[in-house]
Image (cartoon, helix red, strand yellow):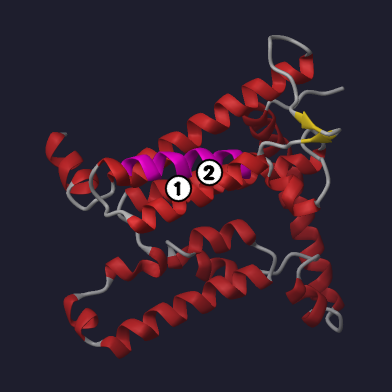
Amino acid sequence: MSDWWYRNIIEPGKLPLLLALFAFVATFVITRTITRLIRAGKGPFRNISSGGTHIHHVVPGIILMTIGGFGAVASSTHGFGAGLAAVVFGIGAGLVLDEFALVLYLDDVYWSDRGRKSVEAVVITFSLVLMLLGGLAPFEVNSLSADQQQNRLTAIATIVVNFLFVLAALVKGKFRTAVVGVFVPFVALVGALRLARPDSLWAERLYGRRPKTAHRAELRAAKHAARWRGPTRRLQDWLGGFTEH
C-alpha cells in the first residue's frame, strides 16, 4: 500500500491534487450542511448581506480559486506552498460549484429543480479528478505505445480523433458521455454513434427532415428519462439536501 501511495500520489507530484480534491469535497459537504441549517432556521448560521445585497458563497469561492490558482502556478508540485495553494483552490472550487446553477442561470435557483445542476457539476468534477488521480490522462494519451510517443504525427492524430468523438457526443447533447469520453475514448465513440438527444444541436440541424429518426430519438430520450430520472433525482436530493415542499 505504501509503495502504491508513493508511486501514484507522492512521487509523481499528485499530492497537491489529492489535497485539492479532499478540500473540494469537504467544502461542498460543509457548505450544504450550513445552507440546510440556514434554510431550516436552525443553528447560529445566517445569510451574509452587505447594503441589502445577499453575498452568495460563490463570491468568496471565486476569490479563493484566484488565490489558489495563482499560488499553484507560482509554486512547484512539491512542498508546503504547493499543498497550501491546492487546499485554497479546492475550497474555492467547492464554494463556486456549489452555486454552479446560480452562475449558469444568473438566478438564485439554489433550492429549485434547476439547482440540481450544481450537484451534477460537483459529481462530474469529483469523478474527473478521481480519474486523474488514478492515472488516466485526457484523450488516453497515457495509453500510447513507445513508438507512438516517438512519432508525433501518430500521437497528434490519436488525440484529434478522440477529440472529434468527444465533440460529436457533446453536439448530440450527451454532456456526461462527452466528459467521461475525454478520459475514456470508447465511451465518447459510443456517444458519437448513438442517436442524438431531441433537444440537441445535432437533432435540430439534422433531424428536421428525418421525422422517423427524430421520433426514434424522442422515444429513446423518454425511455431514458423514465428509467433514470427517479434514481438520479434521489441521488441528487441526497447529496444536495433537497426536500419536498
- Span shown in magenta: 83-97
Residue 83: % across, % down: 32, 41
Q: Give me the residue at 49% from left, 34% from top.
A: 25
Question: Which SS does the magenta portion mostly show?
Answer: helix
Q: Quadrant of residue 179?
A: bottom right
Q: Residues within 10 Å of mark 1 (few under 14, many from 20)?
A: many
Task: State the quadrant of the N terminus.
Answer: top left
Does residue 216 lie above or below 57 as drawn?
below
142 in the magenta segment: no
Q: Is residue 16 left or right of residue 160?
A: left
Identify which residue is drawn at 53% across, 31% down: 27
Residue name at image x 73 percent, y 76 percent: 202
**Mark drawn on residue 68:** 1
Q: Is any part of residue 193 visible from this angle? A: no
- Vertically, is 36 above or below 170? above
Label placed on residue 121: none
Quadrant in which the C terminus appears: top right
Callout 2–callout 1 Cβ contact below 8 Å: yes
- In the rendered image, the residue lying farthest to the bottom is 153
Mark 2 residue element: helix
Left or right of 67, for residue 240: right
Amino acid type shown at disc 2:
Leu
User: What residue is shown at x 27% (from left), y 52% (from top)?
Assistant: 77
In x, y percent, where is residue 56?
72, 37
Question: Which residue is outermost to the top?
Answer: 43
Say what secondary structure mark 1 lies in: helix
- Name the residue carrying label 2: 64
Q: Is residue 94 magenta?
A: yes
Give the percent coordinates (x, y) of residue 225.
75, 48
**Badge 2 local density, few (<14 within 10 Å), some, or many (20+)?**
many
